[in-house]
Amino acid sequence: MRLVKTTMRKQSGMALITTLLLLLLMSAMVVGFMLLVTEGQRLSGMNNEQSKAFYGAESGMEKLTADLGTLFGSTYAPTGPQVDALATNPPVLPASTGVSYVDVVGKSTYSITYPLDKNSNPLAQFSLIKSGSSAFQGMNALETTYTLTVAARTATGGEAKLVRTTQTVGIPLFQFGIYSDTDLSFFPGPNFDFGGRVHTNGNLFLDSGGPAGATPNQTSAVQLWLRSPVTASKDILRDCLSNSNPESASGRHPGSVEITTGGSLQALGFGQGSLNSCLGSGTNSSWASISGAYNGNLRSGLQPLNLTIVLLSKGSSKPIDMIRRPVAGERAANPGVLGERYFSQASLRILLSDNAADITGLDCVSGTAPFNLADLALPVANWATANATALKTAMTAAGTTLLPMAASGAGGKTVAAGYNPADGYWQVGPTGSATPPTYGTPIITGFIKIDAQTSYGSPCGAYTDVTKEILSLGYAGRNLYPVSLAPPTLPGLPGAQVAPSTCLDPHPSAVIRLERVRDNPSNYASATGPCGVAAILAPPNPSDYWPNALYDTREGYNREPTPALNKQVTLGGIMNYIELDVKNLAKWFSGTIGASGPSTQDPSVAPYNFVVYISDRRGNYLPTGTAVGTWPPLSPSTRETGEYGYFDLVNSADPKGCPDNKIEPIPAGAGVLATYGENSFPNTLVDSTGVTTASTLFSNLPNAAVQADPLCATGSGGISPWTRSFLKQANDGRENPNALFRRAVKVVNGNLISLPPCLGGVSCGLTIATENPAYIQGDFNANSAGGGFANASVATSVAADAITILSVNWNDVNSFASPFNNAFSRTGATTYVRTAVLAGKQVSFRIPTWDSTAIDGSQDFGTDGGVHNFLRFLERWNGTLFYEGSIVSLFYSRQATGLFNSGGNNYSPPTRGYQFDVNFLNPTLLPPRTPMFRDINTTGFTQLLLPNQ
């Protein structure tokens, strides 16, 4: 019994031990499980905190990037403090997140760094665009690299750190071979192989002359070669002109279009555009593969490139504002836009208006009052005003011959005496009385103000008035067609082409010329004298001078067929111009003549030197109640618009082009037809003589000197005067003041330009900018002795409302003698032009239904003329125009609004020796104040994981 009990007692002990062991194991398991759950919860919390920190850092990074983009959009060259201020404004997150942008010791982890220049501002330097996502990769751009670093930290220790590198770039406009802010058209009749990148913010139309089936290197067949990348923000069309005229292998432009693939050329065939046909047709389903075959060198649908002047205004300004005068008060309201205008960047600025307040009411002008040109329209001995006598002193000191400004020499003494075709004057002549017009009504009037920028700043620097200094060097030009006839009799026009004048300039050192010696001055002696004048070169009477004038057939008539009065000129085509002598301008900047020129050199940045800006708004007048929409912005007097104002030009239903008073696609404003420029001599326009222009003109002028176009018997065409009204005597247009707002700038004597050295040892450059149409006469920035482009050059650009090239054979008088190329040809000769050009063109419109191949063989009426006609012509060329530069179209012309007509009445084209100036790929060789496109590219992004990173 005892043994049994002992055994049972032993077994009970084992069970107890086993139970205790099991309890211990279970307890350990419970503890382990509890530890596992607790650690899991802790790790999960840590992951949540880490995620919270990462998203906090990402939020901060996106805000910092957006803030930098906003700053760059409103201030394209931000200062160091402006950029640093971005890092003081991290995102404000809800308190419940517990996320902050400071480290454990309270130091900010929200920062942006950049390389510094000598002024501790972000260092901008030219380098290649590196972003593979950019269609403009490989272009030289003014670049600044920013490193954005954001570390976010939670209250419980979660942390994430992100780093992004961002490249802000400014792409120089003239690094493109061809650029257009609007639709861009290629349909050259001859071969066209320009070179350089091509981009448009609009649609791209690609065609060429033909015949079809040419091989890529076959120069005997007309074709188009595009050897650098081609991009468009909208569509690329291969089967249509911009006037909606269909093209095909059997059409008017069947030629090959050869585009680079990066290593070779490949033809873009008909049916291979991004649209199936013309605008409005369906998308080509094969476009992605077609485009891809060019290895990124043919792309559509890109983001538009934006000019700084548009970005800074947030859309309220237009690209054309670069060449326009500013609006009153812009320095306070929008200084960034003001700083982007050539007006503010100019080394030398020349402004002319009928109302002095339209000059003095602008920002960035010096305080000196404008000069009244009418004060000079009388014999020099009678100059009496303070400005006139001061100018007399300055001219004498400079050794310049004292000459009067032009005035009427009409035989009639009163308005009632009427118009006398024998002398052709429209204004009252000398009366012999003690009161004006004792010496004849002034022909050249208006206020002029010339300022030199002597220190540079933002949006503009300090300006000094140099009006008298520039005028003291002269303002009168040579006789173009000496005729043996006693004045004031109006001489006839030549019956054959006249060669360029070899007469001497009475003011050989003039920077600008506002008038010229008339064909038959009063001191004419014999043909054996210097261009027919005796003893003294300069005739003494105000009536011995005429305004500078040429006849522009394209501006004068909106159709190609020869008009009924084909030996007469229209009011709309008479362009009165300021002559800019480039050689003398360069001498003034260099200090060879005058005194102030060298002080205009910007000592800091070489590409800023030199810029001359000209705006002539004399005769530009908006009558009360005729404003159209919100455009154009008005001058301080609310009378000047800076544009022609007559846009009833297309008139597509009428082959004759007579006015129809309908809105058609001419950029006249917000859907409102503008016609305020059609009538001449506004009754309330007051010129610088202090009286209304209309009252100084013969009251019966419309009936006596002007006649209506017989093709337009009704509507505005029956009103005289009107823009398409004809002068009964073409030579009247050479000696009288503008009847309409037809002002221009003619650039002469620019064959070899010599400027002083700039920073870095390179020659300073020259930019000529004007809001008026520009005419470049003769060789420019090239050797006139036949050497072409072999000589050293300077970096130049010309920016204008439109640009016309006049050959070395041009003489203004021929344009009046044979206005429609019918009496004789205005024959052009081989000419060399080397400069970047920035200008406007006409808007394209649908080809009219009446237009046939019999009327318009190339079926291009309604287009803007294409890239090959962007530079306009007025001659029947017999030679080659060698052009080297960059072609940029940023806007539609607002003053030179004449429609493109391809027929021989306007011009016959030269052989085009066009090529891109590869010097512009070197940033140090760009023209002064080259506009830039602004963009931001992300070049790197990473998360840093190690504590020491």
Image (cartoon, rainbow, N blue to C red):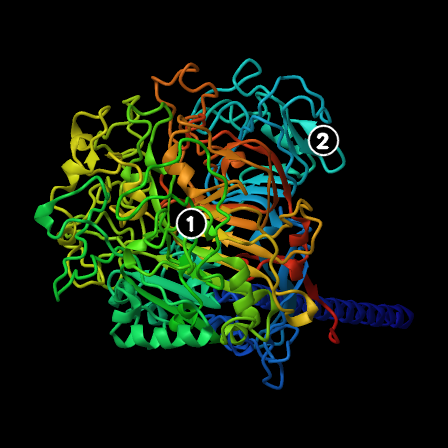
Picture quadrant of residue 33: bottom right
The residue lying at 30 percent from left, 69 percent from top is 371
Relative depth, front residue between 594 and 477: 477
- Image disc number at residue 22: none
Q: Quadrant of the C terminus?
A: bottom right
- Amino acid type for the residue under numbered disc 2: Leu
Mark 1 burial class by Cα count in 10 Å: few <14, some 14-19, many 20+: many
Q: Which percent across, then down, holds residue 47?
A: 64, 65
Q: Does residue 193 appear left or right of residue 630 in this picture?
A: right
Find numbered disc 1 in the image and state the secondary structure of the residue it sits on: helix
| Lower sequence index among marks 2 and 1 | 2
Q: Residues within 10 Å of mark 2 (few under 14, many from 20)?
A: some
Observer-side mark, 2 or 1, equals 1
Q: Which residue is mark 2?
A: 265
Amino acid identity at mark 1: Gly
Above-or-below relation of 249 to 375: above
Q: Residue furthest bottom?
A: 105
Q: Give me the disc on residue 532.
A: 1
Q: Position of residue 63 (x, y in %)?
A: 51, 65
Indicate left or right for 563 with 586 as reference: left
**SS for tag 2?**
strand
> From this viewpoint, is residue 597 visible?
yes
Q: Position of residue 225 (x, y in %)?
A: 65, 32
Q: Nearer the viewer, residue 380 or 891?
A: 380
- How far, Cα to Cα, is label 2 from label 1? 60 Å
